[in-house]
Image (cartoon, rainbow, N blue to C red):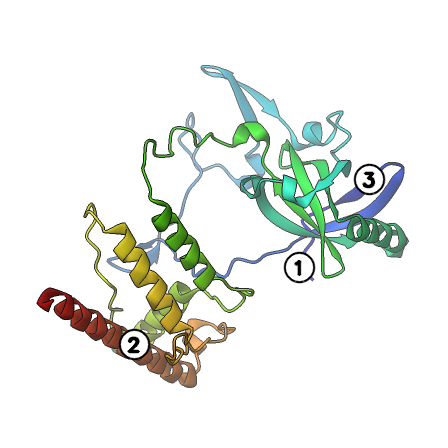
């Protein structure tokens, strides 16, 4: 289990559940260091006092709030922990609502709640079953990282998940962003709906981070002194070009149907590669062979599609 990020209790009514908060997600991105290109030396960030112009050790660094120019009030961690807030050491459930009533844009980071001791097992299970049977989610308040936050509790595979939420005033209004006075035909809208139906999926667990895979292959090639992977051939699209919307929709629906094997066409098989569990330096050679086959298959498919489109365009021009 990951290291607990916070310990406290979940309270709803007079029920208190001792819990430990652990992250529900992990960062699988490839991270880089800043280096000096001439000698590959690490470039480090130094914390320097603006008055003494000297590097300050970590134990001498604290928090301060600027109330006016050149006037800073120091605030200690002990003072923050002792603030008179009921949510300092507790995740306080304040309401139960329908899950559909929560705007997804308000949901931020996710955490698992684990019991802190066997004494918490019974009330933890009670809350979980109550959420499952009522088909509700719990809205809670809690204080982390020097601020009070709003949270959402729901059940996932017999565990209670806490989603940090943004306050209503933290969501910007999109009113000025939506285009106005746009005329669309019902046929165009219906065709767009048809495209959504054609592209509908019941399970999206097969998608993975292809950028990370390509980045790991690049790092592996540079580490082992091999030839760098060839760049992918993407379709060039002219920005600002006026598009025949209905023609684009028709072509999109046709392509989506062909990829699913509809209308007597053979379905295009996309090989779903497993996620890498090793570092780029220890990547398995078999994975590289599979990746090359997948890229070759995609290029052949794109080439066939381009040939079909060109032939169709010539027929239309002839007629």
Dot 1 and dot 3 residues touching (CB under 8 Å): no
Label 1 to label 2, Cα distance in Å? 43 Å
Q: Mark 2 points at which residue?
A: 301
Q: In this view, does 71 lie to the left or right of 39?
A: right
Label 3 to label 2, Cα distance in Å? 56 Å
Q: Name the residue under label 3.
A: 11
Label 1 to label 3, Cα distance in Å? 23 Å
- Write the residue at 50% across / 75% down: 274
Mark closer to the observer (1, 2)? 2
- Earlier in the chain: of badge 3 and badge 2, it is 3
Secondary structure type for disc 2? helix
**Residue nearest the observer in this picture, 259 or 282:** 259
Q: In this view, does 219 lie to the left or right of 200?
A: left
In this view, 242 is above or below 269: above
Q: Name the residue under label 1.
A: 2
**Quadrant hosting residue 230:** bottom left
């Amino acid at each position: 289990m990951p290291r607990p990020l916070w310990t406290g209790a979940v309270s709803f009514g007079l029920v208190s559940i001792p819990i430990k908060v652990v992250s529900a997600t992990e960062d699988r991105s490839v991270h880089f260091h800043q280096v000096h290109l001439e000698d590959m030396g690490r470039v480090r960030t130094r914390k320097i006092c603006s008055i003494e112009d000297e590097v300050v050790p970590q134990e001498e660094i604290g928090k301060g709030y600027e109330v006016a120019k050149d006037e800073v009030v120091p605030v200690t961690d002990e003072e923050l922990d002792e603030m008179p807030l009921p949510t300092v050491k507790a995740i306080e459930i304040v309401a139960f609502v329908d899950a559909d009533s929560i705007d997804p844009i308000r949901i931020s980071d996710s955490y698992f709640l684990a019991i802190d001791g066997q004494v918490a097992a019974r009330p933890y299970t009670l809350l979980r079953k109550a959420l499952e049977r009522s088909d509700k989610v719990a809205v809670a308040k809690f204080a982390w990282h020097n601020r009070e936050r709003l949270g959402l509790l729901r059940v996932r595979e017999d565990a209670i998940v806490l989603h940090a939420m943004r306050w209503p005033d933290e969501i910007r209004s999109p009113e000025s962003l939506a285009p106005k006075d746009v005329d669309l035909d019902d046929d165009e809208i219906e065709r767009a709906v048809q495209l959504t139906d054609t592209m509908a999926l019941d399970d999206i667990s097969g998608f993975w981070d292809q950028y990370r895979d390509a980045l790991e292959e690049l790092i592996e090639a540079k580490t082992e002194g091999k030839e760098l992977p060839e760049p992918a051939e993407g379709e060039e699209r002219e920005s600002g070009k006026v598009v025949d919307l209905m023609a684009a929709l028709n072509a999109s629906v046709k392509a989506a149907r062909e990829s699913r094997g509809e209308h007597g066409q053979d379905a295009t098989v996309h090989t779903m590669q497993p996620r890498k569990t090793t570092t780029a330096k220890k990547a398995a050679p078999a994975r590289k062979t599979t990746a090359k086959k997948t890229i070759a298959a995609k290029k052949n498919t794109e080439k066939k599609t381009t040939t079909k489109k060109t032939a169709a365009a010539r027929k239309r021009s002839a007629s």
